[in-house]
Image (spheres, rainbow, N blue to C red):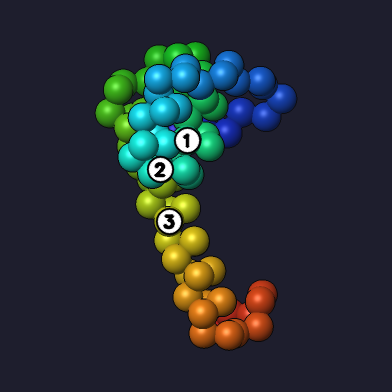
């Protein structure tokens, strides 16, 4: 299930859907929702696959943001990792 389709302009996200994602505070899912919906339409995904793609992106994005915030709060040099 690949959601990234290069060189394809995804149609704009419907305003009501964008507003709902904004209200639910899901910025990471909102950022890729138009692309995911276009891909889902083209590849005839099941509704559960669409939800999964959006929720995976949101949880991954939140984890990245949380790690960046904690690293900044700890005063670690940027770009350095423990792994």
Mark 1 nearby-residue class (10 Å; few <14, some 14–19, many ≥20): many
* Res. 6 mark: none
Work out whether residue 37 or residue 21 is closer to the camera in this orientation and state it: 21
The mark nearer the N terminus, 3 or 2, is 2
Helix, strand or loop at disc 1?
helix
Q: Taking the image as drawn, is residue 30 in sight?
A: yes
Residue 39 at x, y percent in the picture: 50, 22
Residue 51 at x, y percent in the picture: 32, 32
Farthest residue toward the left? Answer: 48
Q: Quadrant of residue 72?
A: bottom right
Helix, strand or loop at disc 2?
loop
Farthest residue toward the right? Answer: 7
Residue 82 at x, y percent in the picture: 54, 83
User: Would you say the residues marked 1 and 2 are in contact, meaning their CB atoms lie under 8 Å apart?
Assistant: yes
Helix, strand or loop at disc 3?
helix
Apparent side of residue 6 relative to residue 49 in the rendered image (left or right): right
Q: List the residue tagged with mark 1.
A: 30
Q: List the residue tagged with mark 2.
A: 26
Which residue is located at x 40 percent, y 15 percent? Answer: 44
Apparent side of residue 61 relative to residue 81 in the rendered image (left or right): left
The mark nearer the N terminus, 3 or 1, is 1
| Circle 3 or circle 2, nearest the eye | 2
Which residue is located at x 36 percent, y 37 percent? Answer: 23
Compute the Cα span from label 3 to label 1: 13 Å
- Asked if 68 appears above or below 6 in the picture, the reply is below
Work out whether residue 13 or residue 23 is closer to the camera in this orientation and state it: 23
Compute the Cα span from label 1 to label 2: 6 Å
Residue 54 at x, y percent in the picture: 40, 37
Mark 2 nearby-residue class (10 Å; few <14, some 14–19, many ≥20): some
Q: List the residue tagged with mark 3.
A: 62
Work out whether residue 26 or residue 2 is closer to the camera in this orientation and state it: 26
Compute the Cα span from label 3 to label 2: 9 Å
């Amino acid at each position: 299930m690949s959601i990234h389709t290069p060189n394809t302009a995804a149609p704009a996200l419907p305003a009501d859907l964008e507003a709902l994602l904004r209200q639910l505070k899901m910025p990471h899912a909102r950022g890729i929702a138009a692309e995911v919906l276009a891909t889902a339409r083209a590849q005839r995904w099941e509704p559960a696959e669409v939800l999964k793609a959006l929720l995976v992106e949101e949880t991954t994005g939140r984890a990245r943001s949380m790690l960046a915030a904690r690293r900044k709060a700890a005063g670690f040099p940027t770009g350095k990792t423990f792994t």
